[in-house]
Image (tube, rainbow, N blue to C red):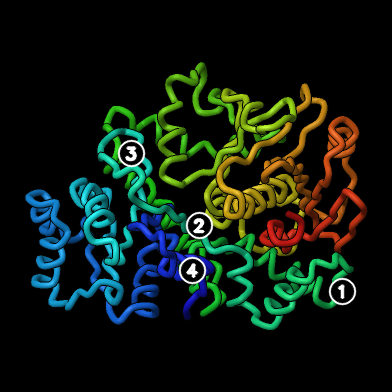
Amino acid sequence: MEIKRDTLEELKQWKESRYRKPLVLQGARQVGKSFILKRFGAQCFENYCYVNFDFEKEHKAEFAVTKDPARIVAYLTTVMGIDIKPEKTLIIFDEIQECNDALNNLKYFHELMPKQAIVCAGSLLGVALKRSEVSFPVGNVDFLTLHPVSFKEFLACYNEKLSEFLENYANLATFERIPQIFHTQLIEAYKLYLCCGGMPETIVRYLENHDWNDVDLVNNQILTAYELDFAKHIDSKDIPRLYRLWQNIHDNLAKEDRKFRYSLIEKNARAREYENSVEWLVSSGLINRAFEVNNIKLPLSSCKNSSAFKLYLVDTGLLRTKFRLVPNSVLQGNNLFTQFKGVLTENYVLQSLVRQFGNNIFYWNSNYQAEIDFIFQKQEKIVPIEVKSTISTKSKSLSEYRKKYKPELSVRFSLKNVVKTDDLYILPLYLADYVIKMII
């Protein structure tokens, strides 16, 4: 089974761009970077040349002795047995953060061999750059981020006809009430996604055998692999703190206000002791961070409170597994799940917003009297997002925000069907991936 990724279309657009530079594809481990680049090479080029610098370390020596892209291509042609032709062959450098010289050489591919299509992937490239472990060819590369599989992509695999209906509905953007038969089916699909998450291997396992034990097995293996990266890529003295932070992220999210508190990691813990660990997890793509804002003005980033933030996992399925929540508690909504359904829903919505609008997602707090779950800026428009995990749509916080700032539009996600007034959009949670298409 193959999951169709929207990123493939973005890669095709990159290929056709007259301003194309070598491309760096970022993203957390296990989100499918290697697969999508190989698929891109197979579909859009006559052939591709794949080099993994973590697995095939012997290639590093050639990049250490030359910066000439023509010589690099000649070397790859010989050792890989592939006839490499500009425009017809895609060169893929995987785990490029493991070879600083190859990363540097992207500059010379751009300057001296611009017609040669070259793409790179690096799970921990952001970490390496933050620690100055690699030098980077600034201005000579394009960037793209691959996130976990979205609900929209999941739905296309799970129920193609339902996916087509939702795509057509979003494209029309009429905001008419969705027929109840479709609404019910889409809510069920959304709950399945909330349990399964967006890791490609996890989704394939579920869709092939519908075994939740298998799903949790894969998710736990992914979580373990992330922890093994800690020991491989950071100083040994920092491992205990990073590990404690990672183990306690869900404990912070379990609190009613979700605000991250260092004291929940260990008693008397201070920000300066753990801030490097937080940055490591953000740079590696394992967590998404939303900073607090107390005031609203343009640019929104100028209102950021750097000392107050919330940390969410990169994937809601991994978070469910980390919480050790059995899928039936999510699907059937029993009482034991009540305290967790809000955080899983928020995690899901934040993932969707980050995919569409980037990492500058905030939340609004008004002296602890009112709070808006998420808020973002798109051009001159600041949009508040309220998240409800049930059918209830009552909210004092959003009412207070709207009264104070009079936003052009506000969005409330819930399990309720579509309702639209002049400046308030009440949307079902399964439409989160279509915000940029429907309202911006």
Badge 3: residue crowd in 10 Å (few <14, some 14–19, many ≥20): some
Question: Which quarter of the rendering shows the C terminus?
Answer: bottom right
Residue 348 at x, y = what percent?
64, 53
**Which of label 4 and label 2 is nearer to you?**
2
Quickly name the residue at label 3: 129
Q: How many marks?
A: 4
Compare marks 4 and 3 and give the one earlier in the sequence: 3
Residue type at mark 3? Leu
Residue 373 at x, y = what percent?
72, 40
Residue type at mark 2? His
Q: Residue at x 54, y 38 (%)?
A: 249
Compare marks 3 and 1 and give the one earlier in the sequence: 3
Q: Residue 147: which disc?
A: 2
Q: Quadrant of residue 18?
A: bottom left
Compare marks 3 and 2 and give the one earlier in the sequence: 3
Q: Residue 264: which disc?
A: none
